[in-house]
Amino acid sequence: MQHIDDETLALLALGEDVLDDAARAHLGTCPDCATEVDGLRSVVDDARAGGPDLVAPGPEVWDRIHAELGLGASSTTPTGGVPTGASDTTTVASDLATVTPLAGRRRRTWLPVAAAACLALVVGVAGGVWWERRELTPAETTVATADLAPLPGWDDASGEARVEETADGRRQVVVSLDAPAPDGTFREVWLLAEDVSGLVSLGVLEGSEGRFDLPAGLDLAAFPVVDVSEEHFDGDPAHSGDSVVRGPLDV
Ligand SMILES: [Zn+2]
């Protein structure tokens, strides 16, 4: 079998599980490939440890990455978020949760190269994959919404809420409120059971809009009602009983 290609070795050095059985068997018996991956690994370790000073790859590197990834002739160098230092590189590298091996690359002669050149490839592959994924990763999706209606005493109040979910399953409730805010009070956002037999505090609403993490494992169907209360600085963490707006999520 032929040697394992450089990109696969780089991904392997980044900790990705990219080898099939044949490639794994080859790596176990081929000193050349083993040496390459060891070298790359030490570079990655250095980078993750904040070791050598790193510089952002130049435009020619991005051009090569672009060509390697088959993205066409003209490259767009990412602006903002380009890996420019050890910490950024670490972030990019560890962000590679799942990548597929870049199959079918031609074999290039891999000489014992300077650490900087190794790193350029590792950063290049990571940066290229990161850039691709950045465009492919969908934004959070709205999974439920609620119109928040005023409760007695808050006739002019109104609000909205929505539940957003990211691709990896994290959920947030975004609440907006239009209501007067008397001095000496603050607003707290809650999720209530439909029959108001139970409630979960999501946190303090500052200003007219807030974003609150939903605890993992919380069953929205059990607490489907969004409620914003007026609270006083009385040291009592319980719901004041004075709700400003409330509305059911369409879950
Ligand atoms: Zn080999």
Image: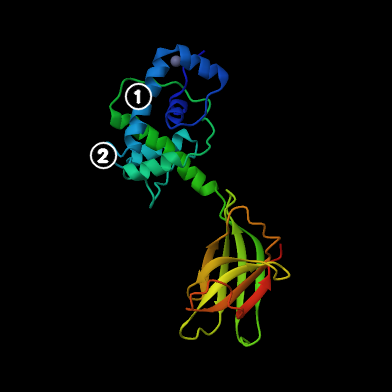
Residue 73 shows in the view: no
Type of amino acid under label 2: Asp
- What residue do we see at 70% from left, 61% from top? 222
Q: Viewer-proximal residue, 113 or 87? A: 87
SS of the residue at dot 1?
Answer: helix
**Residue 97: percent from the left, percent from the top?**
51, 39
Residue 141 image position (x, y, % from top left): 61, 57
Q: Residue 86, relative to residue 209: is it above or below?
A: above
Secondary element at tag 2: loop
Q: Nearer the viewer, residue 66 or 222?
A: 222
Residue 204 in picture, x, y percent from top left: 50, 70
Name the N-terminal-most of marks 1 and 2: 1
Quadrant of the snapshot with the C terminus: bottom right
Residue at the image point whose x is 63% and y is 56% from the top: 218
Q: Are marks 1 and 2 in contact (CB under 8 Å)?
A: no
- The mark found on residue 39 in the picture is 1
**Whether residue 135 is situated above or below residue 154 in the rendered picture:** above
Q: How many marks do you count on the picture?
A: 2
- Of residues 106 and 205, which is closer to you in this image? 205
Ligand 1 lies in quarter = top left
Q: Is mark 1 within 8 Å of ligand 1?
A: no
Q: Viewed as shown, does residue 56 lie left or right of 235?
A: left
Marker disc for residue 53: 2
Q: Is mark 2 within 8 Å of ligand 1?
A: no
- The crowd level at tag 2 (other Cα within 10 Å; few <14, some 14-19, many 20+) is few
Judge from the rendering whether residue 190 lies leftward or rightward of residue 85; answer left or right: right
Residue shown at the point (36%, 21%) measured from the top left: 110
Which amino acid lies under the numbered mark 1 shown in the image of this protein?
Gly
